Image: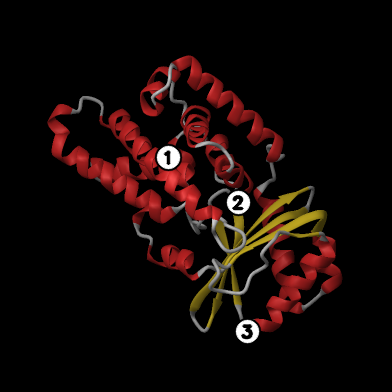
Amino acid sequence: MNDGEQHRRYLFAVAYRLLGSAADAEDAVQEALLRWYTLQADVAQPRAWLTTVTSRICLDLLGSARARRETYPGIWLPEPLPGYDDTDLGDAAALRESVRTAVLLVLESLSPAERIAFVLHDVFGMDFERLAAVVGRTPAACRQLASRARRRVRAAAPAREPVSPEEHRRVTAAFLRASTDGDLTELVSLLDPRVVLRSDGGGEVLAARVPVLGPERVLTLLSGLGRRYAGVLARPVRLAGGDGFTLELGGTLIGVIGIEIAGGRITELNLVVNPAKLRTVTRRGPLSR
């Protein structure tokens, strides 16, 4: 792997958390790398320089991204990343926690400067002096930005209790088995009483426009999807931030569903069926490895 590809993995990890969009993150990283390629001889610390440039590009993009999402039809969810694991790039627990759907949704509610401060400082460990140069604030102001963002993230998306790989495998296997067999009793037993299901169709595919709450309502929606997409093949997959399934029909990817588990039960199901986001999933290259 050459220097550019090594930097690309790290920069994508930063940009995805800043933007919540794999496609936009890839564009931001590519732009930063193109600038670097023209100035390599003058860049003494490439990783630091590229991180700063990528973050500034993301900061410029966040305003327009928020405007688009305010008019987004229904629920907006971040693009799923099947098979993606970047926990070797820093603090594994912080990296894994920061790509949970619940956390990324909270980040959507922050101001661009707060989001930049939280991701760069709390997740990637950037000091406030360097952060100040990215957002154009004083170090003291950046410290306040990160603190406000941290409080909001912790309040809206509390950290999860660790779940062992064995527990993940047990619950996901049971969920898949019960869904395939139509065992409603087993399905209900696997859902937390406060379970939430979010679905993102992007206005192109039928999806719930608001979160679906509670086992009975979630089960009703899942049963309807099962009837609508008879013959769908669900494949367990590791997703950024957790586990889930890819959904295929006739050899075509039609959805990705991520799940969160606590206390042996499923607390969240996040279903992406927006074709535009699925096209990003199917075309992703080295960044997904």
Residue 205 image position (x, y, % from top left): 57, 74
Q: How many marks?
A: 3
Work out whether mark 3 precedes mark 1 in sequence or the reverse, and give the earlier one. 1
Work out whether mark 3 precedes mark 2 in sequence or the reverse, and give the earlier one. 3
Q: Which of 30 and 94 is in front in this view?
A: 30
Residue 12 image position (x, y, % from top left): 39, 45
Q: Relative to 113, is 6 above or below?
A: below
Residue 243 image position (x, y, % from top left): 61, 56
Task: Using the image, tell me which numbered label, if any, was put on residue 281.
Answer: none
Secondary structure at badge 3 equals loop
Disc 2 marks a residue whose amino acid type is: Gly
Name the image quarter holding the C terminus: bottom left
Residue extending farthest to the top is 140
Secondary structure at badge 1 equals helix
Which residue lies under the disc numbered 2?
A: 242
Asked whether the viewer can see residue 20, the reply is no
Q: Which of marks 1 and 2 is in front?
A: 1
For the residues labelled 3 and 2, the Cα–Cα distance comes to 25 Å
Which residue lies under the disc numbered 1?
A: 14
Is 99 on the left or on the right of 199, as rendered? Answer: left
Secondary structure at badge 2 equals strand
Work out whether mark 1 precedes mark 2 in sequence or the reverse, and give the earlier one. 1
Residue 147 image position (x, y, % from top left): 59, 24
Q: Residues within 10 Å of mark 2 (few under 14, many from 20)?
A: some
Disc 1 marks a residue whose amino acid type is: Val
User: What residue sits 81% from the left and 66% below the top?
Assistant: 217
Task: Using the image, tell me which numbered label, if any, was put on residue 231.
Answer: 3
Q: Relative to 128, is 228 above or below?
A: below
User: What residue sits 61% from the left and 62% below the top?
Assistant: 74
Asked whether the viewer can see residue 43, the reply is yes
